Image (cartoon, coloured by chain):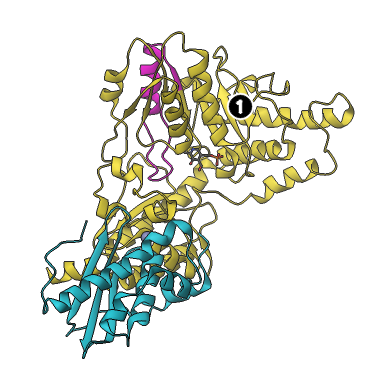
Amino acid sequence: MAYSQALIERFRNPKNVGEIADANGIGRVGNASCGDIMEIYLKIENNIVVDAKFKTFGCASAIASSDVACDLIRGRTVEDALKLTNDEIVKELDGLPAQKIHCSILASEAIALAVEYYRNGGKMPTEDKMV
Amino acid sequence: MKVYLDHAATTYVDEDVLQAMMPYFVDTFGNASSQHQYGQASLNAVDRAREQVAAAICARPSEIYFTSGGTEADNWAIKGIAHAYQHKGKHLITTVVEHHAVLHPMEQLEKEGFEVTYLPVHADGRVDLEALKKAIRPDTILISVMFANNEIGTIQPIAEIGKIAKEHKIFFHTDAVQAMGACPIDVKELGIDLLSMSAHKFYGPKGVGALYIRTGVKPQKLITGGAQERTMRGGTLNTPGIVGMGEALSKAVRDMEKNNEHIRALRDYFVAEVLKCIPDVVVNGGMEHRLPNNANISFKFIEGESILLSLDMDGIAASSGSACSSGSLDPSHVLLATGLPVEYAHGSIRFTFGKSTTKEAVDYTLECLKNTIEKLRAWSPLYADHIRR
Ligand SMILES: Cc1ncc(COP(=O)(O)O)c(C=O)c1O
Ligand SMILES: [Zn+2]
């Protein structure tokens, strides 16, 4: 498993791990088959993501991807946050081993769910994406 | 501090073993098949190693065939027996907890039209002997059950299986790769017809192993080419490797009791401390019939690969059957076979101790492990759910 130095550093010292007590956007996605479950917490003010945090059950790639995703969307408008792509995350990590790409895809899915929660006025989206 | 707790993956080469091997790289480099003095000197060394390996399992030297390792020995035994005896039947029996070096040849044979029964195991990892008896059919030609499991260390009831196989006149192969040097083995007493081993698991070099084939048993050849190994396995003999294997195995058998005692004491201490200090853990596999060097522990709410990487950053090397790192999506087939729930299986780590592991190293590992588990749980949404509940 050749992990990049960037990924190792993220995994060693994640900056955004934790919950936001007054989060108004929460999204959890999971992939039980791989063993990665990710929860994203957003604080949205005036349509801007002013803070983002995460909790993740999963491999180092999943944890590092979550951490990077939070950095990437902080300060973005909600619309731009939704545009976060997996490629941006992978680039920020200096690449991921091929079999690990799927672990990084969860982050954008979790953000989409968190925004849906926000737009629903603080209710969990009805569709349960946990599998 | 650097701590290596992955001896089931491979061991370093013992200093005495290395010294024994050294002359066979430059000074005595001849091809053991050559007629001249160079060749004969190598052949003498190979013969001596063959005697050492045979003595370690109470076999005759003529029953030992050197291979490139455990994987080749397993492939040879299974495909060789299947192909040579298919006129007697096309049914094979093995277990769900075998190494892939056994499972994949079995799957290959299934594609060729053989039928394979995969026996279940109990929660402790041991095979169900009643299920074995029921699985036997008139067309069964081979039973292959590993001596000891590589993931959870479970030692199988080999003598009982050998007896059942003999009663039904079925060949019995055992993958003893993890058992060599840890379990006393007498192939005659245990009723073993074929046995696989690999030098790099008992402080010998990598890339060399052996298959024991009882006199009279005639598997088809796997590697054809030269007339080496009494025409049964082609290829120039790996003299330094074979010499290293002989030396390593005789030393491992000589020191077995002493090493086991040391290793078992550290393992038992480690397991007891983990159970005492870390909540929500499961020790996988039974403790009674178990290799002394193996501790396999599941940590709930967190995932194995992240535990492994975190320990690695502290200088500690262990192993995980993590789905995510192995490239397959499923957690360990062995752990699931013991009935461990998937959520536990994802967070499993194997620690395997060695003869030079120290108490200090174990204490350091325990300290780092506690911190790692605490840290990763604090990051886990599943642990947060658990705390809120
Ligand atoms: C039980 C078992 N069988 C077979 C093998 C394969 O042996 P080798 O690495 O020598 O091919 C291993 C080693 O990983 C093993 O643990
Ligand atoms: Zn993953």
**Chain A, which colour?**
cyan
Which residue shows up at 35% across the image and 64% down it?
Answer: A105
Chain coloured yellow here = B
- Residue A102: give x, y in percent of width and height: 38, 60
Label total for image: 1
Q: Which residues are magenta?
A: B145-172
| Residue behind mark 1 | B54
Q: Which amino acid, mark 1?
A: Ala
Residue B248 shown left or right of residue A6 in the figure: right
- Residue B266: give x, y in percent of width and height: 43, 56
Which residue is more in the foreground, B80 or B122?
Answer: B80
Q: Is residue B55 above or below residue B380?
A: above
Which residue is more in the foreground, B177 or A80?
Answer: A80
Assign the C terminus of chain B to one quadrant of the image: bottom left
Which residue is more in the foreground, B236 or B353?
Answer: B236
Which residue shows up at 68% across the image and 40% down it?
Answer: B244
Which residue is more in the foreground, B165 or A66?
Answer: A66
| Chain letter belonging to callout 1 | B
Residue B329 lies in the magenta-colored region: no
Which residue shows up at 89% across the image and 26% down it?
Answer: B36
